[in-house]
Each structure stands twice: as C-alpha cells, then as structure tokens.
Amino acid sequence: MITSRHLPRLSLAALAACLGVAGLRAADGKVLLTPDRSVKIAGSKGKFDFLEVDTRNNRLLAAHEKDETADFIDLKTGTVLARLKTGPTVGITTNPAGDTYYASVQDDKRIAIIDAKSLKETGSIALTGETDAIIFDAKDGALYVTHDNGDEVWAIDAAAAKVKATIPVPNGPEGMAHDAGADRVYMNSKTTSQVVVISTKTNTVVAQWPTAPATGPHGLAFDAAAGRIYVSGDNGILVAIDTKTGKVIGSTEITKKVDQIAFDAGTKRIFCAGPGQMSVVQATKDGVKFLGNVASADTAKNVAVDPATHQVWTTYTDGTDAYAKSWRQP
C-alpha cells in the first residue's frame, strides 16, 4: 500500500502508474494534470522555499533554503544552470529587464544581488531582521521584503540598493503580491488571519481584510483581470477576496498546510501546494471551485506556473537528491 511517507521517493510517472489515472483526474473524470518533466539535483538533501518563474530568461528560480543556495533552472533544456551559494535563501525575484536577481537570505538578514548573466553575486543589501517573502514592484522600481515572524515590511529602492521605508504591519507576514493598477501590495498575516493592504505610494498600511473562513494564511496570488486575490489558510480553506471591497466572495476546501499557491491567468486555475498533495481550484464568475487533489511529495510545498507553457512546477527532496518536477495542464 502507498502511504504519504513513501511519496517523496516516487517519480511522478511512477506515482501516476501506482495511483491509477484517477489520481490525476477530477471527480467528474476530467484530467487535472499530466506528469511531465523532471530535473534532478544530485546530492541535495535540503528543503526548498519560494519558487518563481522568470519569464524573460525562461528560468525557474528556486530558493533552496536548507542547502543555502539560489538555484537557477533552464526551463527549455531542463538543466541546472547554477547553484549559487548565498546562505539560507527563502525567495528569489527579478527586475523587469531580467538582468538582476534579488535573493532573500533569511538568517543572514540581507538581500543578495545577483547578475542574471553570470549568475554571480554582485552586491548585498543589509537589513535589520531575518528576511522572508520578496517581490518586485516594477512600476516603482522597488523591492518589498517581509520580516520573518516579525512585524514590518521593508520597501527598498532597487536602483540605489537602499531601504527607503520600514512599514509597520501586523505580526506574522507571509505571502505577498503586487497590484500595479491600484498601487498596492497585498500581504498575508498568518498571526491575525488578515490580508494587509500597503500603499506603494505612501508605504503605509491602508486596509486590513479578514480572511475567514481561511485561518493562518500563507499562500497569496493576484488575479488582475478579475480584481481578486486568492488566499490559502493553514486550515485547508482557500478564499477569493474582491480587491475593491476587501470582502470574501467565495471559498472552498483544499489540502491543509499549504505554503505557496500559484495562479495561471490563462487557464484561471489556482494551484495550492501542500505536503503530499496539490489542490487544483478553478476560478469562477462567482468565486472558486475545487477540482481535485494531485498526489505529490511530502516536501513539495511550493509551486510556480510558467504562463507561456502553463506548466506547473514544484520542487522537493527525498532526503538524498532534490528534484524540480512539472505537470502539463489539459
């Protein structure tokens, strides 16, 4: 019998064969995801954190926290381009030009600046606390970085490589997203179960929206076309929130302990990565609809979508080696 503790040692192809076609299908029989590519990172035992797709350079940016590296994977060739030793990296983002990466190095209390061509570190931005989530505000040329388990967000002038504002926020900041149209950053507070709304013009908190029935929110994704954010709670609930009113307009059950979620604007699907399985949710006119769960690995708690190919990527370790795995959408 297959149990969750065995899942990390199975390839996705083998997993699909063992579980049967139903393991990759929704309750109505429609295919959710099809196992696709696998990139092996040999001799890697440490867990990953946030994933992001760099669409300009066609790369997967994998924050490899426990290996203390920033990993860069070519999505065309499926090869590891570099594993840059940066320290315990928990998030990587890029600027619009695609020539610079910024890595959130948690315990070192800094942001590493990385040249995208050479994949070498070229600078560092010192901060006053342990870092966590990081996003780039392309409209204002600013980085937003959360203080891990703290009560502040740093706004950084990327060109000057200097902090321009320290923003007090409710304790326990988690995932963030940038809304260029509204000049806002949306940020989860796992401690208060709220979405904190930050104005990127004044770098102040302008609203706080309850996420109930989702509690302990971690994952957050922005749907610009619909004017919504999707928020995943530790308790296994995903909510859709209207960004005009701040009200929850829909919710559905998903797998518990989701760390990161990703939204595919092309297919209107939300992918919620939790230990042992990933929930697939459809964004609808009225809110959200649960489609089903796809078995994955116990340590595959992070996810990113390539908007060009609609491939869904996760990373995990089986205790000996690490893998970047992808699925194809129907």
Image (cartoon, rainbow, N blue to C red):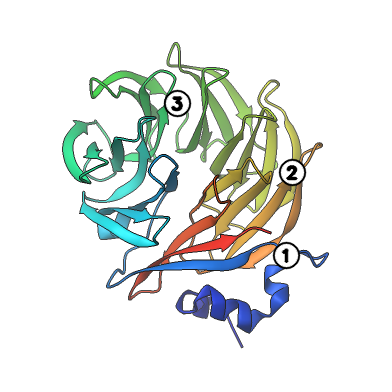
Q: Quadrant of residue 244?
A: top right
* Residue 197: percent from left, percent from top: 54, 23
Q: Which mark is residue 169?
A: 3
Q: Residues within 10 Å of mark 3 (few under 14, many from 20)?
A: many
Q: Is residue 3 left or right of residue 320?
A: right
Q: Which mark is residue 56?
A: none
| Between 201 and 76, the one nearer to me in the picture | 76
> Disc 3 versus disc 2: distance between alpha carbons?
25 Å
Q: Earlier in the sequence, mark 3 or mark 1?
A: 1
Q: Earlier in the sequence, mark 1 or mark 2?
A: 1
Q: Which mark is residue 251?
A: 2
Give amino acid for label 1. Answer: Val
Name the residue rendered at 25%, 56% in the picture. 83
Name the residue rendered at 30%, 37% in the picture. 102
* Residue 180: percent from left, percent from top: 52, 22
Which residue is most to the left? 122
Assign the C terminus to one quadrant of the image.
bottom right
